[in-house]
Amino acid sequence: MADPIIEIDEPEVPSVDPVEQATATLKEKFPELSDDSRPNYTGIMVPPEKLLEVAKTLKDELGFEYLSSVTGVDLIDDGKMEVVYHTYNLDAGGGAVVLKTQVDRDQPDVPSLTPMWPGADFQEREAFDLLGINFPGHPDLRRILMWDGFEGHPLRKDWREAFYEQDNKPFKSRWPEGHVFRAEERTAFGKNVKYPAGWLPEGLDNDTDEEIYSGMTVSRPKSKTDIRTDIVTVNIGPQHPSTHGVFRMVVTLDGETVIDLKPVMGYLHRNHEKIGERNTFLQNIPYTDRLDYISSMGNNQGYVMAIEKLLGVTPPERAEWIRILMVELTRICNHLWSIGFLINDLGAFQTPMLYLTIERELILDLFEATAGSRMMCNYMRFGGLAYDLPPAVRGQETMAFLTELVYERLPKILDELDIYLTGNEIIRERCVGIGIMTREEAIAYSACGPMLRGSGVNYDVRKQDPYSYYEHLDFDIPVRQGGDVFDRYMIRVEEMHQSLKICRQVLPYLKQTAGAPILEGDPQYNIRVPQGGDAYGRVENPKGELGYYVTAKPKGTNPERYHIRAPSFINLTPLGLMSKTDKVADLVVILGSIDIVLGETDR
Amino acid sequence: MYGFGFVKGLTTTIKHFIGTYTDEFNWAGKGGRYYNDEALKVRQSLKTEGAITVMYPEEKLEMPERFRFVPFLIMDDPAPGQKAGKDWCTSCGICAKVCPPQCIWIERGKKPNGRPKPEPEGFYIDIDICMNCGYCSEYCPFDAIKMDHDYEMASYDRSASHIHDKERLSKPISYWRAIAPGRAADEERRRVEAAEAKNKKKAARGR
């Protein structure tokens, strides 16, 4: 065998691993704590009554101040509900301290962490909505993704959807006695929907909105001017071109100034996680494409990494390099798109966006030639990739295409973008000092990605908790201190330059490894997890930290729990905070600077 | 100076605007910028300047070999006078099992004595459900199902006509060779190699 191309330096062992240290300290202080004893599970078991104390110690004394993910797991066989918390130390980097707490399934009350960590707000509401876990102490515990009249909690294992066929795919009705049927022919309503006699839309319960409106702040700050203003509550969306999808903001205005804002989402909810728990492991990969459909390669990578941890496989070298190339190009795609739309929201309709779209199209050409699809790439597999790079892209040899793209075409457009937009007075007027979020707020609200780095936190999963081959690459993490819309824009521009820098470093490795295998083992259509266990795969997606929490039973063919820590969803938590005291006209700009994709927000 | 950045930005817009027309002049003597295969190739490459519009449906993008849109079944080229050739599908059911949205229904053929026979009796794909992931073709051990390049499938009826049966799905191998020559040749080579290895093994065992 040839010599390995990268020399893996012995990593400098830090004197003490912050996670281990924190775990030891916690256990010393709270003797009630124990390790998760199930084989291949990680985390600390916390009794629910001690949760608040433990979390407080972890946050204030041990420096694990960032609550990344909160989710529930329905352990129906044990009659328990489990809540899983992933917390990180932003300064020290490294892995997560995972807290788990189990409560009775029939009366699942877990104390809310929202007063301590506002970032838990939406995530606890989601767990309440989908799993029926109560969080006493939560200031606003309402359903978030399902509508309010909804019966039941769909992620519970005993809840069955309308077209329920079988617990796990593949369905037995497909083979060998496959008699075709259409799902809609099997509905209770028949060919088309038939409403019950006497049913009137006006009769629908409209309490939902009352609940939102009654929760809005109406106290007005003291006016500085003599102008008399009214307090009104307005709905922006769900059908609004600037909400980037079907998304609604309930806003209370004092004149033109926002004094309170509540996001309402779930219009695109399809219970991705339930679908994922019915699917086999492999079948989930194309579904992850459809989360953040602008950056499907990154979604693939996060999911594949989580399952690779469960399977215990590592992809071959060439596969890792191609993954990095694809993911970094995806980042450029995503940032071009989000900047284009931000400028669109500012009122420069279409022109700048279309210029940026041209470059995005060229990258998508590469994706299409490689993976077969422009957006729904479905490219990565457990232990490697589906295909090697193609011989040619748009009639040009692939390596020549990549070299020209990375060295000439994209740098040119990034420079042009700088000349075109960055110095523009209108953009500066509209972006500088708007939608401010301070460093402390960004951490407390679990903001991630450009939102976090725009507020002065130097945190990027690629650097602080490196995965794939990122630790062998030379790149910088742009950080800016202002925490406003303009800083988030600048972070995105600088990140594109850094991504290009990474791509340039990857290209020689691609040349060296040409012809090397891209998949560990043979392609398998029925993947079984030998040991079971839980795994959390997280990547720095263009929009922020994307995490997949997957648990599986031994020899399982499908996930027992499949949760996505969606950056678009969690980044909306501080939207109300950022918009307060700004004008209503700036709302769409602030929303644009978060860069949400509703496919991921609503899942 | 206030307004300078604004003016600088506008020059970029003007450059793009003019770029489209200069490119049109460049192509004037060579068959025009639009409705010209040569020009389309340049317009879709990294050398593109100005507007990159494709004048669909008169102009169409070339599909890369790996492009995937709705599966089809491979059969032998029909003999002269015949409508259909022999199916490559053995109704092993791997495609139906791996399909993420479960849009494939296969009815396995039966011999008169009731034992299964390696041919599908019925094969249905609901293309409304199909998510074009390409798993069926990726994991088919017999190269019998492939992803098509024909993306123009609009129809007036969305019920029966969107469930493709075996007749509608089957296309001759020559069609696959035409749309994806490189991949078809690769697969051919791999099949020949596998057959040779099998024969060698057989011969070794026979001896």
Image (cartoon, coloured by chain):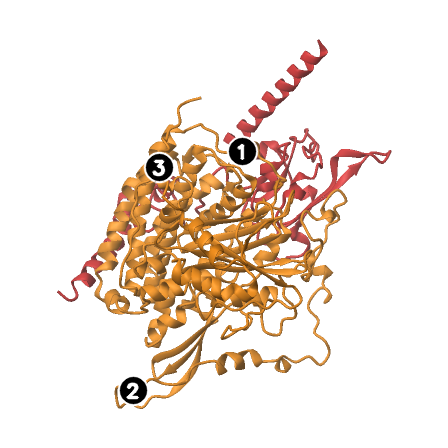
Chain colours: A orange, B red
The crowding category of the residue bearing disc 1, from other C-alpha atoms within 10 Å (few below 14, some 14 to 19, many at least 20), is few
Q: Chain of mark 1?
A: B
Report how far apart the C-alphas of labels 2 and 1 lie in the structure. 73 Å
**Residue A62 placement: quadrant:** bottom left
**Secondary structure state at the residue bearing disc 3:** helix
Report how far apart the C-alphas of labels 1 and 3 lie in the structure. 34 Å
Residues flagged by tags 1 and 3 on a common chain? no
Q: Are marks 3 and 2 in contact (CB under 8 Å)?
A: no
Q: Is residue B200 left or right of residue A564?
A: right
Kind of residue at disc 2: Ser
Foreground tag (3 vs 2): 2
For the point 45% across and 40% down, the residue is: A369
Identify residue for label 2: A223
Identify residue for label 1: B178
For the point 63% across and 59% down, the residue is: A74
Foreground tag (1 vs 3): 3
Viewer-proximal residue among B25 and B110: B110
Kind of residue at disc 3: Val
